[in-house]
Image (cartoon, rainbow, N blue to C red):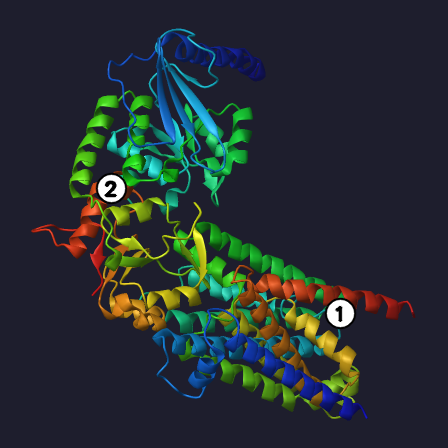
């Protein structure tokens, strides 16, 4: 019965995401007739204005990035919430995104980008290294701190510490560097270049597939590490898998699209609430589509506002109320209401 | 005993300071100049000559954020009750913008700058050398004025921008004599250059300032086009993220381009502030506009190929196809510094693109290859 509900939810989310994609590609922004948009998408190149082809492709690519990035953040949040057994865990809260930001800041403002080296690739590598570093520190501390709330506070402090380091770099950087970093910090799904898009989508989809392979372990981990061990789950391997998957997903999105907040925490909460399922075979794809929905919906809002609203502002406006609602709901549960 | 000596010396030191200040404020007066500067183009400042004093008034233009500021230079004792009075030659000033430095440099009084906002962003070697020599202090942190360093430099006058009015008003209560300089609000390059006369008056270098202005004006007017050519329509600059900020049709830079015969693509859009377009809109417009003028922080050797590598859609722009992209590297040239006081050279550079001038070597603008 639950599976049926999940299938309906999955199909509904899929249809909504596709509709939003069509809206984003065909109707938002500069005025291009929808028939021409369809012709361009169908491979027709002889349209009235030569820039239309590029504009439509650009809209399509940013929509794909929005869906993949939103989905990836939601999965990263879901896995971390299971792992830390805390519904408020997420790449943004636990300092993972901050770690990625530190890597990006080091390349943009810290003078680590050497002349002649590939700036974009270096930023990606540094971002992933920063995110992994932050998560490793958190996991190391988690060996000594068993209370999840305390660990969450440690994650927050780690985030603040990293932000302080970024601020130091910011103050000593030149105008062009600070400008580039500020722009990156506002978040955008439009900054992934055509040459990078394949790498980005592969990265995000491999995260999705790997997390699907971990769904059995995650199902067991919901009931605790000891219970998972008793079911024969290799918890050490699972732990390594979680580190790699969440770091790659969170860092990939952070590096390419900026530090996008709230999607990673809000979507898993919503999906769990709507789905009622505890089977991650369903929850993971649902979260991916839920994150994708929030990602592309945010991009549509950004573009409807003629880009006057930064992406991070829109995700915060949508995500923050969901998180507050979750906290209130948690309090009610604890109070036995 | 040691403490007793310190207590004995403290009042003595204090007395020395006060007597110096007294001398500066009341006994040394400015030398009244026979030269009276005349303002021809600028709308943002006025010079009022009185009996024994000159008042320099700066004010807002059109609907810009309203302000008015006055500094009085006294040649006699206590002539009027103006709030900000200068009784001796300026020896220590602070500047909020590097454009202020351009005027001071032209008048040879850069050595009077004791504090500046954003020293790290200055690229002009003359200014850097002068600043290093004089140990000029940084008075801002992240573009906000830092009160303590500014008070430490104790400037006789602080040249400030009116867009940070609240910060500047707060400084007044701390005893800092600030003076609003809003040359960027002027409507034409010559009007902006004319602000050199204001600095000339403040530094009693009216003749030098007027000569500087007259020479540039003469050359500018000799080259200025009387009519714009609609075939030479242009879009401007590069996007910032997903947005494309384009200057107002009434802006200085657009006026400069129009004086060179170019026609602004967005000339019918109203307003005095920068206009915000989506990148998509400008991508569409770029396929129509014949010219594209770019002033950007790019290396000197920046090429058309580099431009298209930044965004593939640029290859569909008419200006790119016809190799009519006019470029000024703000990293390689002093556009935002000396460009302010060399409008005649900026104009000649632009005209040289459509009507090459024999043997002319452009300083700021060139066609991208």
Question: Residue under mark 1: which chain is it in?
Answer: A
Which of the 4 image quadrants contains residue A210? Answer: bottom right
Which quadrant holds the C terminus of chain B? bottom left
- List the residue tagged with mark 1: A148
Q: Nearer the viewer, residue B287 or B144?
A: B287
The answer to whether one can see residue A252 in this image is: yes
- List the residue tagged with mark 2: B343
Label 2 Cα crowd, 10 Å radius (few <14 / some 14-19 / many 20+): many
Local secondary structure at mark 1:
helix
The residue furthest left is B358
Horizontal side, residue B141 vs residue B253: left or right = right
Local secondary structure at mark 2:
helix
Residue at left offset 65%, top offset 67% = A262
Expressed as whole percent of the image width and height from the top left, the position of residue B42 reads 33, 32
Residue A220: numbered disc? none
Q: Nearer the viewer, residue B113 or B188?
A: B188
Horizontal side, residue B351 vs residue A101: left or right = left
Q: Nearer the viewer, residue B99 or A25?
A: A25
Label 1 Cα crowd, 10 Å radius (few <14 / some 14-19 / many 20+): some
Which quadrant holds the N terminus of chain B? top right
Expressed as whole percent of the image width and height from the top left, the position of residue A308 reads 53, 59
Which of the 4 image quadrants contains residue B158? Answer: top left
Q: Which circle, 2 or 1, is nearer the viewer?
A: 2
Residue at left offset 77%, top offset 89% = A5
In this rendering, the answer to whether A227 lies above or below B249 is below
Question: Residue under mark 2: which chain is it in?
Answer: B
Expressed as whole percent of the image width and height from the top left, the position of residue A94 reads 65, 67
Same chain, labels 2 and 1: no
Residue at left offset 87%, top offset 67% = A332
Residue at left offset 60%, top offset 85% = A208
Tell me whether the residue at label 2 lies in contact with that at label 1, contact meaning CB atoms closer than 8 angstroms. no
Horizontal side, residue A200 vs residue B129: left or right = right
């Amino acid at each position: 019965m639950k599976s049926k509900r999940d299938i309906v939810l999955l199909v509904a989310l899929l249809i909504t995401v596709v509709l939003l994609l069509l809206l984003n590609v065909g109707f938002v922004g500069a005025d291009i007739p929808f028939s021409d948009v369809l012709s361009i998408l169908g491979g027709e190149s002889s349209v009235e204005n030569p820039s239309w082809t590029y504009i439509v492709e650009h809209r399509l690519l940013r929509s794909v990035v929005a869906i993949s990035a939103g989905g990836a953040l939601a999965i990263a949040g879901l896995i971390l919430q299971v792992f830390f057994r805390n519904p408020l865990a997420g790449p943004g809260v636990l300092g993972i995104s901050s770690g990625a930001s530190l890597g990006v800041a080091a390349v943009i403002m810290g003078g680590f980008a050497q002349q002649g080296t590939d700036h974009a690739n270096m930023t990606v590598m540094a971002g992933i290294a920063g995110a992994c570093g932050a998560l490793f520190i958190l996991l190391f501390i988690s060996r000594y701190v068993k209370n999840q709330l305390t660990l969450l506070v440690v994650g927050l402090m780690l985030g603040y510490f990293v932000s302080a380091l970024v601020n130091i770099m910011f103050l000593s950087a030149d105008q062009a560097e600070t400008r580039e970093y500020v722009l990156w910090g506002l978040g955008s799904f439009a900054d992934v270049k055509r040459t990078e898009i394949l790498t980005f989508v592969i990265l995000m989809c491999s995260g999705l597939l790997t997390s699907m392979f971990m769904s059995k372990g995650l199902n067991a981990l919901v009931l605790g590490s000891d219970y998972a061990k008793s079911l024969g789950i290799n918890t050490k391997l699972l732990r390594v898998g979680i580190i790699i998957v969440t770091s790659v997903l969170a860092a990939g999105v952070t590096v390419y699209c900026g530090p996008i907040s709230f999607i990673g925490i809000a979507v898993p909460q919503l999906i769990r609430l709507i789905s009622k399922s505890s089977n991650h075979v369903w929850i993971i794809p649902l979260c991916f589509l839920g994150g994708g929905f929030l990602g592309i919906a945010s991009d549509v809002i950004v573009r409807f506002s003629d880009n006057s609203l930064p992406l991070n502002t829109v995700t915060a406006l949508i995500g923050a109320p969901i998180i507050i609602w979750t906290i209130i709901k948690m309090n009610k549960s604890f109070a036995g209401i | 005993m040691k403490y007793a000596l310190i207590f004995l010396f403290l009042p003595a030191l204090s007395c020395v300071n006060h007597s110096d200040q007294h001398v500066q404020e009341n006994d040394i007066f400015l030398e009244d100049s026979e030269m009276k500067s005349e303002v021809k183009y600028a709308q943002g400042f006025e010079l009022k000559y009185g009996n024994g004093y000159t008042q320099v008034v700066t004010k807002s233009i059109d609907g810009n954020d309203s302000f008015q500021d006055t500094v009085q230079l006294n040649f006699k004792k206590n002539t009027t009750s103006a709030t900000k009075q200068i009784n001796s030659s300026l020896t220590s000033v602070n500047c909020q913008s590097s454009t202020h430095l351009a005027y001071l440099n032209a008048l040879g009084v850069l050595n009077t700058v004791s504090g500046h906002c954003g020293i790290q962003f200055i690229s002009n070697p003359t200014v850097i050398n002068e600043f290093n020599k004089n140990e000029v202090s940084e008075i801002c942190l992240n573009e906000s004025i830092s009160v303590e360093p500014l008070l430490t430099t104790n400037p006789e006058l602080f040249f400030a921008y009116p867009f940070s009015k609240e910060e500047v008003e707060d400084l007044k209560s701390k005893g800092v004599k600030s003076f609003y300089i809003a040359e960027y609000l002027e409507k034409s390059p010559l009007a902006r250059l004319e602000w050199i006369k204001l600095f000339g008056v403040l530094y009693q270098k009216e003749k030098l300032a007027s000569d500087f202005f007259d020479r540039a004006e003469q050359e500018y007017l000799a080259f200025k086009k009387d009519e714009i050519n609609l075939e030479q329509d242009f879009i401007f600059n590069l996007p910032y993220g997903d947005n494309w900020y384009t200057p107002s049709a009434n802006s200085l830079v657009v006026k400069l381009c129009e004086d060179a015969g170019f026609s602004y693509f967005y000339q019918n859009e109203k307003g005095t502030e920068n206009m915000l377009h989506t990148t998509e809109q400008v991508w569409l417009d770029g396929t129509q506009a014949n010219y594209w003028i770019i002033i950007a922080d790019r290396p000197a050797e920046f090429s058309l190929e580099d431009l298209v590598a930044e965004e593939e859609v640029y290859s569909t722009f008419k200006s790119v196809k016809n190799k009519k992209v006019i470029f000024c590297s703000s990293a390689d040239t002093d556009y935002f510094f000396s460009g302010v006081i060399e409008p005649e050279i900026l104009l000649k550079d632009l005209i040289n693109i459509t009507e090459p001038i024999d043997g002319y070597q452009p300083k700021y603008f060139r066609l991208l290859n």
